[in-house]
Image (cartoon, rainbow, N blue to C red):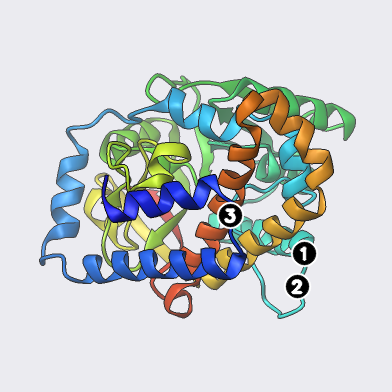
Amino acid sequence: MSLVAAAVSAAERMPLPDSVMRAGIAALVGRTARRLRSMPEGTERAFAEAMRSHPIALFPVDANAQHYEVPPGFFEKVLGPRLKYSCGLYPEPGTTLAQAEEFALEETAGHADLADGQDILELGCGWGSFTLWMAERFPAARITAVSNSHPQREHIEVQAARRGLLNVEVITADMNRFATGRCFDRIVSVEMFEHMSNWPQLLANIQRWLRPDGRLFLHVFSHQATPYRFDHTDKADWIAQHFFTGGIMPSHNLIRHVAGSFALEADWRWSGTHYKRTALHWIERFDAHAEAIEPLLRATYGADWQLWRRRWRLFFLATAGLFGANGGREWGVSHYRLRPL
């Protein structure tokens, strides 16, 4: 076991002050940033070419279980009121988590060029934050949402019924196998493509589901220059082992190498500080609701519930540390709007 792996193992198994944890995370993040800066020219293009040899999603069952084996009640205690399990947007120092969710959803809809009356397909809908927001904002739109999680589908269906939203259909499907004979005006995806290993194939599939004058919108977290894979076989890659098996960290310009029969119409980049603040708000809520969260963790993890409580908290701390690095300039969030050629 490497020194890094040993340090990570110790950090998850014993309570340590946040100051110590943050210092350790900063050291590991700095180490990763230096390694990425030393990568040879052509790394991005080579990564894009290598994608073609992979299935669309490498470990969909593992990735799904890592985040969603805990019940919806856990996320209701940790996330904001929209249950947005992705980056919020913080225009002001005093922006709350609830406001950050709304700002992010509003800007996402604008970048995607959504409008009432459209047929909209959302790939990787999570707990329905954007699905339900779109259904409320665009009552004449027809929203089809795809998730790889039965609990997520059930949660969204219950919420849609409670809110009287009749324009939502939720489908449970693995992206390796998902297909539809329908065509859509807009296809949107928020923080799902990072779980996908073969973007060229997935984009080719998506083009068949998009009308000729339609648009594809993607929201991904990204490194500013260099893409890489999370390696679950590396004992030092703690995130890959417990939270992101089969995942990738795209670079901001990776999409330009894999767009295929799409043209990149517009792109935007959010500072990583927005994700840092999102994760810190999740930690605040995680700590504030520790008593209510405990039985949920016990029911899910049994005798290992305390270990997993530390793991979840460490995951949120690591997210804040990664995206806050170098003033939010190293890692951040990328938005893309693409049109079919």
Confirm or deny contact between disc 1 and disc 2 (CB under 8 A): yes
Q: Look at mark 1 in the image and give the residue it sits on.
A: 99
Place of residue 103 in the rendered image (x, y in percent of width and height, measured from the top left): 70, 64
Tell me the SS state at disc 3: helix
Q: Is residue 103 left or right of residue 32?
A: right
Residue 57 in view, yes or no: yes
Residue at 11%, 61% in the rendered image = 42
Q: Look at mark 2 in the image and give the residue it sits on.
A: 95
The disc label shown at residue 316, or none: 3
Place of residue 135 in the rendered image (x, y in percent of width and height, measured from the top left): 74, 40
Q: Earlier in the sequence, mark 1 or mark 3?
A: 1
Tell me the SS state at disc 2: loop
Marks 3 and 2, how far apart in space? 19 Å
Residue at 26%, 40% in the rendered image = 200
Marks 1 and 3, how far apart in space? 19 Å
Labels 3, 2: front one: 3
Image: 306 above or below 299: below
- Which quadrant of the structure image shows residue 7? bottom left
Q: Earlier in the sequence, mark 3 or mark 2?
A: 2
Kind of residue sitting beneath label 3: Phe
Kind of residue sitting beneath label 2: Thr
